[in-house]
Image: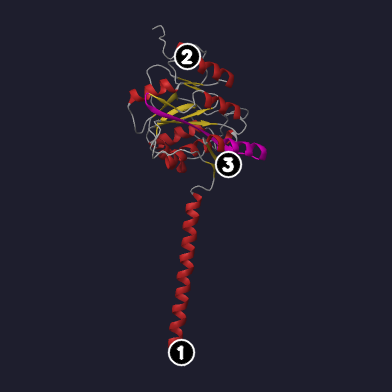
Amino acid sequence: MMSLKVRLVFVALTALGALRIYFSKDNLTQLKYNLNTERRDFLQLPELDCEQNPPFLVLLVASAQDQALARSVIRGTWGRERLVRGKRIKTLFLLGAGPNKNLSGEVSQESWQHRDIIQKDFVDTYNNLTLKTLMGMEWVHRFCPQAAFVMKTDTDTFVNVYYLTDLLLQKNRTARFFTGALSLNKFPIRNKNSKWFVSTEEYPRDKYPLFCSGSGYVFSSDIAGLVYNVSRSVAFLKLEDVFVGLCLERLNITPQPLHSEDVFFPFGLHFSVCRFKKIVACHYVRPKAMLLYWKALESSLGEDCPA
């Protein structure tokens, strides 16, 4: 018969083997979980191979599920994939989720058709614009760091991709670069009836840091990863442009003008072909006007304007 000592050794070895198997399975499960969570909350991802064919400029357009018409107009105007000065320009749309199953199904179909939608499972509301912007930053950081520049804008913003590309090529900045309509010495609105109300609990400081209007700002692609990573240590704020400004402040990155003249117009601008040839972005442009403005601009590309 097996001696008591041998039995104890056998039991100990058996137990040790079981524990090794258990913890190996646990580690494997944890590894699989970590890998899965890398993509688990993306509902839609675009079809874009940035390693093989990196774009010079990625345009990230914050959109809502029910703005299919605006997205369609952008795809047919300034958001159409094209080469400008030999540089590839690519437009993608940032969306959240919602309870309307029919609308969600339409978005899925649109994503399958155009392959240009980035979507996560947060509720798509104004107060979650910060999450939407960070989703775009995350996507660039993880899937397209090879892009040279990124622009975050809105569906009601007209973008002159020709002039923007020219200015970025002239600027020749490829790292820690951030530009847009600079907002300096702006104060939190404490009126509870305002859309932009921010309580002292949310933001106790008396003044916002320097930031760029969310209607359109441009940055070198390395900014995406820097902002995305530092955002975890910055108190959440629903005002996405201010929140990005807070992240830049934490990173010691100062937004700067893209040109000596104003080229970003967050409060709108009266249209004329010659005027719009020398702008980057104009806010508050509806789809019908977007079509008319773009057609007029493209038709005049070979024409000179008065000095």
Give SS at disc 3: strand
Mark 2 closeness class: few <14, some 14–19, many ≥20 residues within 10 Å: few
Farthest front residue? 113
Location of mark 1 (residue): 4
- Residue 156: x percent and y percent? 55, 24
In front of the other: 104 or 136: 104
Q: Say above or below: 292 vs 107.
A: above
Q: Quadrant of residue 192?
A: top right
C-alpha gap between disc 1 and disc 3: 61 Å
Q: Mark 1 vs mark 2: which is more N-terminal?
A: 1
Question: Label 3 belongs to which residue?
Answer: 122
Q: Earlier in the sequence, mark 2 or mark 3?
A: 3
Whether residue 167 is in magenta: the answer is no
Tell me which segment is drawn in magenta: 85-111
Viewer-proximal residue among 178 and 298: 298
The amino acid pointed to by label 1 is Leu
Residue 91 seen from this side: yes
Q: Which residue is identified by label 2?
A: 299
Secondary structure under the numbered disc 1 in the rendered image: helix
